Image (cartoon, helix red, strand yellow):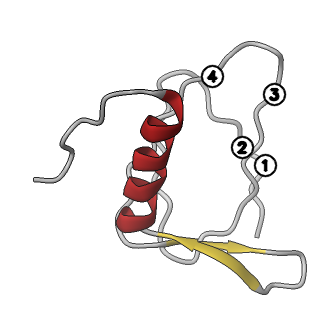
Amino acid sequence: MESDWVAKPGTFVYEPPGDIHTLTVDGDEPKITLFMLEGSVQYIDDKDELTYQDDVFSKYQLYLNYCQEHGVKEQNLVY
């Protein structure tokens, strides 16, 4: 179920398992958001079907791919 609230600068949002929403960014100003994930994030389409799933391993792979594609030295993020 979608919520009608708007996060403002400094807002902390906790999303429990099963929370379903659409992330939107209003305006033209750049936004910086820190997402801290525990477990997996599932992406659901309009038919309530799972289209993609993220977890710590897929996010880390995205980071490694980005670094390689943009010539950025990878940092050791595994601890």
Which residue in the protein does label 4 denote?
31
Is the C-beta separation of discs 1 and 2 under 8 Å? yes
Q: Nearer the viewer, residue 47 or 71?
A: 71
Secondary structure, mark 4, is loop
SS class, disc 3: loop
What label sits on residue 26 in the rendered view? Answer: 3
Looking at the image, which residue sits at the far left?
Answer: 79
> Crowding at label 2, few (<14), some or many (≥20) Cα neighbours within 10 Å?
few
x, y percent for residue 19:
60, 70
Q: Which residue is mark 2?
A: 5
Q: Nearer the viewer, mark 3 or mark 2?
A: 3
In three-dimensional space, the C-alpha distance between marks 1 and 3, rounded to whole angstroms, equals: 14 Å
Which disc number belongs to residue 4? 1
Above or below, 21 against 77 in this view is: below
Q: Is residue 69 above or below residue 79?
A: above
* Mark 4 or mark 1, whichever is nearer to me: 4
Judge the density around disc 1: few (<14), some (14-19), many (≥20) Cα neighbours within 10 Å. Answer: few
The x, y position of residue 41, in whole percent, is 53, 69
Local secondary structure at mark 2: loop
15 with respect to 60 (left or right): right
Q: Residues within 10 Å of mark 4 (few under 14, many from 20)?
A: few
Residue 45, label in figure: none
Mark 1 or mark 4, which is nearer the start of the sequence? 1
Report the residue at 18% width, 42% height from top: 76
